[in-house]
Amino acid sequence: MSVTAAGINRHPPTIPNRRTDIVKQKSIRPVAGSVALLVTVAVAATSCGDDDHPNDLSPAAAATTATSSPTAAAPTTSPSPTASSSQPVDPYAPRAMGKSVTTADGGATATVYAYRQPVARTAPRPDEQPGYVWGAADVKVCAGKTYPQGISVSNGPWTLVYVDDTQIEASSTGYNQFPEPEYPWGEKLLAPGRCVRGWITFPVPGNKRPVAVEYAPEDEPVAPRWAVK
């Protein structure tokens, strides 16, 4: 605990007067008596200081304590992953709904947003096939800037893929009950930077669902797919 000069000055000892008397009476040991009394005065002053500041450390003790205290070790952190460490996208793996895929030549960017089954329940059955219903996919295609004249789009490149690798093409028949807006049936020219979005309806077996929606434009080496949940 620290003993400040101010603490000592607040309690001036009265012993020095007694020391004078002792020196006069015992002149044969003035040095020893003076040293003893000085030690007594120092002890008394220290005790006074302790009462005023019981929790203080002396400057030397504080410095020693600060020096001897162990320094807290800096926390170690694991390096955060960077973009370079991310795995490349597998071109054969189905994408999630809402993810966009650009064709290899950059001519188009396609997106599938949803798949619904059944739809158009009041429409006639698909080709009068027992157990078949209508299913529909919400898709979009945007033309890139690779071809200044634009690209031609239709529902032809779109198919539904099943777990047994069978595929179903879009319906060649339309009914008013089909979901709208509809994606273009026939060829439609799409200028660079323009997009078209709509529903494509398919005749599908009612007792099973497709596993993916596929977009296979001409000359695309790996047709992208979107997983159907």
Image (spheres, rainbow, N blue to C red):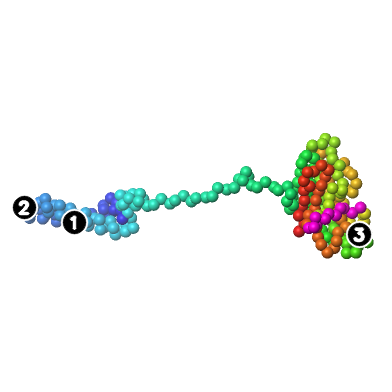
For the point 88% across and 64% down, which residue is it? 131
Q: Magenta stretch?
A: 162-172
Q: Residue 171 lies in magenta, yes or no?
A: yes
Type of the residue with mark 1: Thr
Task: Tell me the CA gap for discs 1 and 3.
Answer: 114 Å
Front residue (pair 123, 16): 123
Within-10-Å neighbours for mark 3: few <14, some 14–19, many 20+: some
Residue 16 visible in this rendered orientation of the protein: no
Within-10-Å neighbours for mark 2: few <14, some 14–19, many 20+: few
Q: Are marks 3 and 2 in contact (CB under 8 Å)?
A: no
Q: Is residue 28 left or right of residue 212?
A: left
For the point 21% across and 54% down, which residue is it? 42
Which SS class for mark 3?
helix
Type of the residue with mark 3: Pro
The label on residue 126 is 3
Residue 224 coordinates in the image, percent (x, y): 77, 48
Task: Tell me the CA gap for discs 3 and 2.
Answer: 133 Å
Q: Which residue is mark 1?
A: 40
Q: Which residue is mark 2?
A: 28
For the point 81% across and 48% down, which residue is it? 215
- Position of the C terminus, as image quadrant, is bottom right
Q: Residue 93 lies in magenta, yes or no?
A: no
